[in-house]
């Protein structure tokens, strides 16, 4: 397996990071705790942290079978954290994406495949220029089946030598999910002209679309 997205995207990418490019104008938060999300017998939920959620949302929301992809925070000890608090790295939270999907159209295994291939799981608390525990690689599993699949996939990738360095992805039980502020939702689609979107997110999305063309929404 070839690692698709390394930190050397473009020389200019070193000028941008997710935290540096937060919206200038104040927008009120719609902060709620989602432990169940909008799930029913026909849907399931996955929670992944693999860097800036602006990037991960732009990728997973394109997959056929994904009903919703919501940016937020999970894994920390502070209730209802703000983006500013999470960016300090002191809340314990990671920037994550809460994905509600239709398992009849896309499986958890396929979501894991996208997860592993669209970030670097070997860099501790870092994705490219975004540095801090909030950018850690993490899978928050919702049940034992998800835990077993994540651990098996991680072990097999390490054993195969798919990456030059050991995988440091954290695999932990899901507890609470806090929805991020409104301006973070659908960020790439709403702010495509922003430098971070053009320099960092767009190349990732374009590579993802080529590799996973058959899995995209039509």
Image: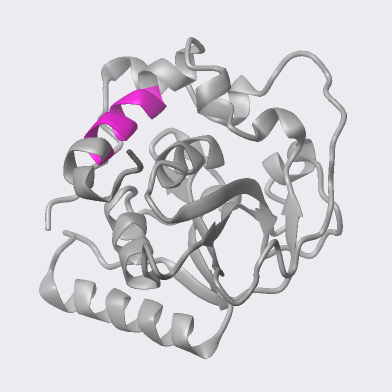
Asked if one can make out residue 187 in the rendered structure from this viewpoint, the answer is: yes
Q: Is residue 199 above or below residue 182?
A: above
Q: Position of residue 14 (x, y in %)?
A: 39, 22
Q: Is residue 104 above or below residue 146?
A: above
Q: How many marks?
A: 0
Q: Which image quarter holds the C terminus? A: top left
Asked if one can make out residue 15 in the rendered structure from this viewpoint, the answer is: no
Residue drawn 71% across and 28% down?
183
Q: Is residue 62 left or right of residue 194?
A: left
Q: Is residue 93 left or right of residue 148?
A: right
Q: Which image quarter holds the N terminus? A: bottom left
Q: Quadrant of residue 177?
A: bottom right
Residue 213, magenta (yes or no):
no
Q: Position of residue 125 (x, y in %)?
A: 49, 53
Instruction: Give 101 or 208, whichever is nearer the viewer.
Output: 101
Q: Position of residue 139 (x, y in %)?
A: 49, 67
Residue drawn 76% across and 54% down?
178
Q: Is residue 92 above or below residue 131?
A: below
Residue drawn 53% across and 48% down?
135
Question: Main SS type for the magenta part?
Answer: helix
Q: Quadrant of residue 44?
A: bottom right
Colour scheme employed for the rendering of this structure? one colour
Residue 204, magenta (yes or no):
yes
Q: Which residues are magenta?
A: 200-208
Instruction: Give 44 or 109, whichever is nearer the viewer.
Output: 44
Residue drawn 36% across and 57% down?
115
């Amino acid at each position: 397996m070839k690692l698709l997205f390394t930190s050397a995207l473009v020389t200019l990418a070193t000028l941008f990071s997710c935290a540096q490019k937060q919206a200038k104008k104040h927008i009120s938060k719609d902060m709620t705790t989602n432990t169940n999300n909008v799930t029913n017998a026909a849907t399931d939920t996955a929670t992944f942290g693999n860097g800036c959620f602006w990037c991960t949302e732009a990728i997973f929301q394109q997959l056929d079978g994904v009903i919703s992809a919501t940016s937020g925070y999970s894994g920390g000890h502070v209730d209802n954290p703000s983006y500013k608090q999470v960016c300090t790295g002191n809340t314990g939270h990671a920037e994550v994406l809460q994905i509600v999907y239709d398992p009849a159209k896309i499986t958890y295994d396929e979501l894991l495949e996208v997860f592993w291939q669209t970030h670097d799981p070997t860099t501790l608390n870092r994705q490219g220029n975004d540095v801090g525990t909030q950018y850690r690689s993490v899978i928050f599993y919702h049940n034992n089946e998800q835990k077993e699949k994540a651990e098996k996939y991680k072990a097999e990738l390490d054993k195969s030598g798919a990456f030059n360095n050991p995988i440091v992805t954290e695999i932990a039980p899901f507890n609470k999910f806090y929805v991020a502020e409104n301006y973070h939702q659908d960020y790439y689609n709403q702010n495509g002209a922003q430098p971070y979107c053009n320099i960092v997110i767009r190349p990732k999305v374009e590579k993802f679309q080529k590799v996973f063309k058959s899995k995209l929404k039509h």
